[in-house]
Amino acid sequence: MKLIGSKTEAEFRESLTVSHIQHFSPESNSSLKSYLRSQNIPVENAYILNEIPEESTDFYSILISGSTVITVEIDKCSTQNCSIESNIDLKHYLVGLSKIEQIKLHVAKELSGMQT
């Protein structure tokens, strides 16, 4: 898929950048960042594709280094109860994605420095 500079792409670029700064900047004290680092997962080029907040946990789908999507469960009460629920390469992650989610993924890949 080739990005064309659309308004949708610009909106995704802005929201992905904001969430990246919020969770993964050097100044951030995010429990998500702490957990990923404890698992030796690089966060410098990580972008959150989806976030599902629940009462006691949050679920995140995160593009890591432009090549893998992981789903992480973060317990709001204890970082010891966090886990990586899935680890999927992009080829398999793309299967069944809607057009809009594919655009979001390609914008995230571009932001991470990977070719789209």
Image (cartoon, grey):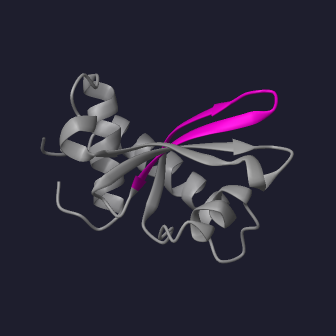
Q: Is residue 7 shown above or below 66? A: above
Residue at the image point whose x is 65% and y is 77% from the top = 26
Tell whether 108 sits left or right of 83: left
Location of the C terminus by quadrant is bottom left
Residue at the image point whose x is 30% and y is 59% from the top = 66
Viewer-side residue, 107 vs 52: 52
What residue occupies the far left of the structure in this picture?
A: 2
x, y percentage for residue 6? 28, 39
Residue at the image point whose x is 24% and y is 45% from the top = 90
Tell whether 55 sits left or right of 47: right
Q: Is residue 95 shown above or below 34? A: above
Viewer-side residue, 46 vs 100: 46
Location of the N terminus by quadrant is top left
What residue occupies the far bottom of the structure in this picture?
A: 26
Viewer-side residue, 75 vs 1: 75
Q: Is residue 62 shown above or below 35? A: above
Helix, strand or loop: magenta stretch? strand
What residue occupies the far front of the structure in this picture?
A: 80
x, y percentage for residue 81? 74, 47
Residue 97's image quarter? top left
Range covered by the magenta-colored residues: 49-63
Does residue 58 belong to the magenta stretch?
yes
Residue at the image point whose x is 62% and y is 69% from the top = 38
Viewer-side residue, 36 vs 28: 36
x, y percentage for residue 108? 36, 52
x, y percentage for residue 17? 51, 57
Tally the marks.
0
